[in-house]
Amino acid sequence: MGEQGAALQKYNQELVKCIEQIKVKRYELIQEIEKEELIKAELETELSSVKRKLDEVNISLSKKLTLKQNFDLAISESEATYMKIVESSQILLSKVRRESELLGELTD
């Protein structure tokens, strides 16, 4: 019976040793989990901040693009109107020249 008791005590010591090793590995894993949870929380905070900034930039960009379209329209309409004025000026100049020539011929 002494041999069985010694074998049982040896198995018991190995079992306790294995359980302690598992506990150490679990503790190390818990430490790693806590570190990664902190990193995750920091990244989520950064992500939230970046998303907020992106939303602000998108809103600003949308307003500016709308404003640019208004400028483009104003420029386009102004240029078209200006071209009509130039054309009218050319027509007027041609008419005044002809009238001047006719009046010059009549006074000669």
Image: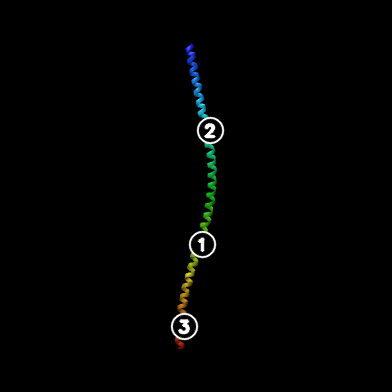
Q: Residue at x 51, y 24 (%)?
A: 19
Judged left or right of residue 63, residue 101 is left
Q: Residue 8: x and y, percent?
A: 49, 16
Amino acid type, label 3:
Ser
Residue located farthest toward the top when viewing the structure as drawn: 1
Assign a secondary structure to mark 1.
helix
Q: Quick one: 19 or 67, which is closer to the camera? A: 19
Q: Looking at the picture, does residue 69 appear above or below residue 35?
A: below
Mark identifier at residue 54: none
Q: Residue at x 53, y 33 (%)?
A: 31
Q: Residue 72: x and y, percent?
A: 49, 62
The residue labelled by disc 2 is 31
Assign a secondary structure to mark 2.
helix
Q: Looking at the picture, does residue 17 appear above or below residue 30?
A: above
Amino acid type, label 2:
Gln
Assign a secondary structure to mark 3.
helix
Amino acid type, label 1:
Phe
Nearer the observer: mark 1 or 2; the answer is 2
Q: Residue at x 50, y 16 (%)?
A: 9
Q: Residue at x 50, y 19 (%)?
A: 13
